[in-house]
Image (cartoon, rainbow, N blue to C red):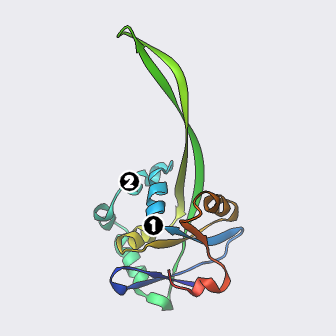
Amino acid sequence: MSITINLDNNKKAYMIFKKEEDSIPILIDSKLFKKLWENTTYDAHYQVAKGNEESWIEDYKYKWAELGFSYGKNNPVPLARINYEQNIYHEDIIKTKFFLFKVKIDTKESLIHSISFNDGVTRTIWLLCNGAKKIPFSINIKRANELINIFKNDIELVYGNSLKEEY
């Protein structure tokens, strides 16, 4: 099933969801996506995730994504496949006594939400650079439900005929 993504300057990109075992397509608001991706724990994509349009356009594979999307609706680009994680980070709270000694007084826990890629980084940065407000991804059903429960207003499941709608 084909998905149409609205871009800047009334342009459109076309993608396709290829069903894999226990995966579904979802739409993520691009601002939320960037925030979650910046928290990635996957070292290979860490620098790209912290980048911006200027650095992404310079990515050596960017021109290939441009070419892939140029074929339009006759040859839609496959959805990127992502993972969702929740990580708990522990930070010691330290207090200095008598200007010399440091004493741990507590531990602060933080829950960090993050997204990483199985594949599709370059097509995703191409969509971001071209103004996509919502980006479709393929994700494990369980992880999709976790994302939707936490970020209800910024993530949508894509089902049946709604796959033909424009985003």
> Badge 1: how crowded within 10 Å, few (<14), some, or many (20+)?
many
Q: Nearer the viewer, mark 2 or mark 1?
A: 1
- Provide residue 26's location: percent of width, then percent of height: 59, 71
Residue 158 sits above or below residue 73 on the image: above
Closest to the observer: 167 or 118? Answer: 167
The type of residue carrying mark 2 is Lys
- Provide residue 51's location: percent of width, then percent of height: 35, 57
Residue 59 sits above or below residue 43 on the image: below
Mark 2 to mark 1: distance in Å? Answer: 14 Å
The numbered mark, 2 or 1, whose residue comes first in the sequence reads 1
- Provide residue 98's location: percent of width, then percent of height: 37, 7
Q: Which mark is residue 30?
A: 1
The type of residue carrying mark 1 is Ser
The residue that appears at 50% across and 26% down in the rendered structure is 92
User: In the displayed image of the protein, which residue is found farthest to the top?
Assistant: 98
Q: Is residue 1 visible?
A: no
Q: Is residue 161 visible?
A: yes
The residue identified by callout 2 is 50
